[in-house]
Amino acid sequence: MSTSIYLQTMMELTLPSELGYEVVARDAVAAFACRLCIAPDRLEDLKTALCEACINAIEHGNLLRPGLRVQIRCRVEVEQLIVEVVDQGVSAFAPRSEPLTIVEKLAGLGSLRGMGLMLISQLCDEAGFVPSAGPGNCFRFAFYRHPMA
Amino acid sequence: MSDETNQREPVEKVIELRLPSKLGYERVAMDTASSLARRMGFHAERVESLKTAISEAVTNAIEHGNQQDAAVKVVVLLTARDDELIVYVADQGRKPLDQDCTTPTPKIEDALERDDKGGWGIWLIRELMDEVEFTTAPSGGNQVRMVIHLEQ
């Protein structure tokens, strides 16, 4: 499939960097994904992953600063739906080298928060930070459209 | 500080959506606007009116303004204010909108006699929204501005 066809099925959404707007993003991306061959349970995974990624962008990448924006790009390819969540890079993403497990968190060894990236990685087929054209952090995750049984 | 500067500026929250010009993607605009309107506190009935109006406006942009060329985008701007939601829907103007078509008063009897039962979109938008204005988009395309007031 040519690049031009990829571009035809691309959606972009920008919204205020404010907690609560991740719900608007969730509903927009869910409506977009509904048009693809993604199973209902996978759609729920997509919605959860998107909310987590947006909250990370708002809280960490943009440090909850008012007036900033979060951009979401959705691109349909033959085999997958790719979603990118881009913040304005007030704070560069710096992952822990050895994130605590849920068991360790429950044992009180760290904050009960901070499980978003782990959750996303469990729900998506691919996920991770990728180089961004601008100063912001760009988090990309993908859902295969026809996962192998 | 003067009285004028004491007057609170309306707080605006802007959401921008860029969609492929492909029929069906109007659903994305509908659900996005619906989600925002619910967050703002609009009653369910008004949310349904908003969804219908946006659906008609985006469908017009896809079908007429962009001639269903999926490579060009329909741009939807949603501006949430304390007391209203402003919606802009803009296309690339492949087919300019005839201004005579922006104030229609269709008759059901005429429509029943036609094979094509369409042509009710702009009339519906005007019935459902509180303010409607057809202008030219910054891109040079057609643009409709719709406002729905939030009744507390």
Image (cartoon, rainbow, N blue to C red):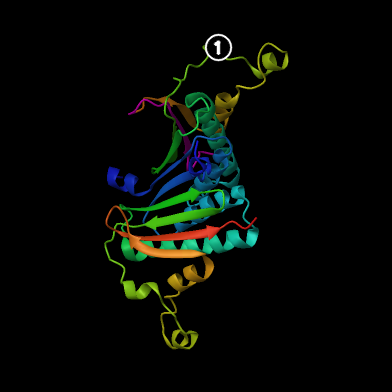
A108 or B43: nearer the viewer = B43
Q: Mark 1 — on which chain does it sit? A: A
Instruction: Look at the image and tell me whether residue B115 can be seen.
Output: yes
Q: Is residue A37 left or right of residue B115?
A: right
Residue A62: x and y, percent?
Answer: 48, 27
> Which SS class for mark 1?
loop
Q: Is residue B91 above or below residue A99?
A: below
Q: Is residue A104 above or below residue A145?
A: above
Q: Is residue A138 magenta?
A: yes
Marker count (numbered): 1
Q: Which residues are magenta?
A: A133-149
At 61% from the left edge and 14% from the top edge, which residue is drawn? A100
Residue B80: x and y, percent?
Answer: 51, 48
B115 or B96: nearer the viewer = B96
Residue A8: x and y, percent?
Answer: 34, 49
Instruction: Look at the image and tell me whether residue A37 can be seen.
Output: no
Q: Is residue B84 left or right of residue A72?
A: right
Q: Is residue B33 above or below residue A18?
A: below
Amino acid type shown at disc 1: Glu
At 53% from the left edge and 40% from the top edge, which residue is drawn? B6
Give the quadrant of the C terminus of chain B.
bottom right
Q: Is residue A27 left or right of residue A134?
A: right
- For this orientation, the residue located farthest to the front is B2
At 64% from the left edge and 58% from the top edge, which residue is drawn? B44
Q: Is residue B69 left or right of residue B6?
A: left
At 46% from the left edge and 20% from the top edge, which residue is drawn? A93
Residue B124: x and y, percent?
Answer: 49, 71
Residue under label 1: A98
Q: Is residue A51 magenta?
A: no
| Image quarter of residue B134 | bottom left
- For this orientation, the residue located farthest to the right is A107
